[in-house]
Amino acid sequence: DQQVKQNSPSLSVQEGRISILNCDYTNSMFDYFLWYKKYPAEGPTFLISISSIKDKNEDGRFTVFLNKSAKHLSLHIVPSQPGDSAVYFCAASILTGNQFYFGTGTSLTVIP
Amino acid sequence: DGGITQSPKYLFRKEGQNVTLSCEQNLNHDAMYWYRQDPGQGLRLIYYSQIVNDFQKGDIAEGYSVSREKKESFPLTVTSAQKNPTAFYLCASSPLAGAFNEQFFGPGTRLTVL
């Protein structure tokens, strides 16, 4: 059973606009969340994380928002650039645990 | 350069043969992980190891085996018991075990069983 879901398999955005990638989870015990970015034929690379004690974390053009009551997190990329075109995975974990649970990924295309 | 290497990038095997995927890291990380990715699915954990000579099953360990004889190496064997072995396999490591640690991924091996 998929505990972390990314319901949009793909997203297209114009360069310079905002990209919003969404992620939902079912396990209320999750308290640490990450976003990874993956280019074709490469392994995922870490992008940004957030713990459940916060509802927002920013790093440059990337901001992650966490809504614990809705069990939802989102990644905002502003402004979007063509180099952001990749597959984005969200992942969730229980801090006292040993593994992450990954979503299915959203393929972002930023159109120049 | 520090990082994680997986070889080969593409691997073809006949059905019924065991095959071993290589994963090496020179990051001095304690923990290592193997994931499998299938189309339309997220990364699923096969096995992980928190320390040398110790490893734990993940969610989909059936048909796979691992060893951790050295800190820098965590090979994965896909056995003939694995019913659907064709997939993209990713190895990862983290400085310490525990879900609070960012994991660093290798480039992956695409295994095709004919």
Image (cartoon, coloured by chain):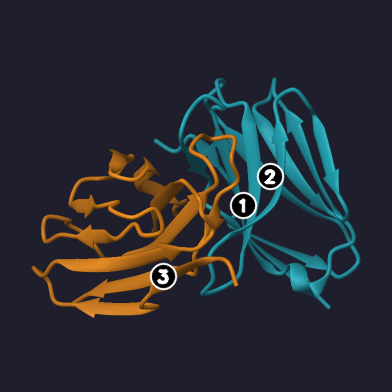
Chain colours: A cyan, B orange
What crowding class fits label 3: few (fewer than 14 Cα within 10 Å), some (14-19), or many (20 or more)?
Answer: many
> Percent from the top left, x then y, of residue A14?
84, 69
Residue identified by numbered label 3:
B6
Element type where label 3 sits in the image: strand
Residue identified by numbered label 1:
A8
Which residue is drawn at the image coordinates 46% and 70% (left, top)?
Answer: B5
Q: Nearer the viewer, mark 1 or mark 3?
A: 3
Which residue is drawn at the image coordinates 35% and 79% (left, top)?
Answer: B10
Element type where label 2 sits in the image: strand
Chain where mark 3 sits = B
> Percent from the top left, x then y, of residue A43?
53, 65
Q: Which mark is residue A22?
A: 2
Amino acid at circle 1:
Ser
Q: Quote the CA–CA distance across marks 2 and 1.
A: 8 Å
- In this view, the residue in front, A12 or A21, is A21
> Percent from the top left, x then y, of residue A74?
73, 42
Above or below, comparing residue A103 to residue A45 in the picture: above
Element type where label 1 sits in the image: loop
Which residue is drawn at the image coordinates 49% and 69% (left, top)?
Answer: B107
What crowding class fits label 2: few (fewer than 14 Cα within 10 Å), some (14-19), or many (20 or more)?
Answer: many
Indicate the quadrant containing the N terminus of chain A: top left, top right, bottom left or bottom right.
top left
Query: With A80 as the anchor, is B25 left or right in this view?
Result: left
Amino acid at circle 3:
Gln
Which residue is drawn at the image coordinates 33% and 40% (left, top)?
Answer: B58
Q: Quote the CA–CA distance across marks 2 and 3.
A: 30 Å
Q: Quote the CA–CA distance across marks 1 and 3.
A: 30 Å
Amino acid at circle 2:
Asn
Do marks 1 and 3 share a subunit?
no
Q: Are marks 2 and 3 in contact (CB under 8 Å)?
A: no
Do marks 2 and 3 share a subunit?
no
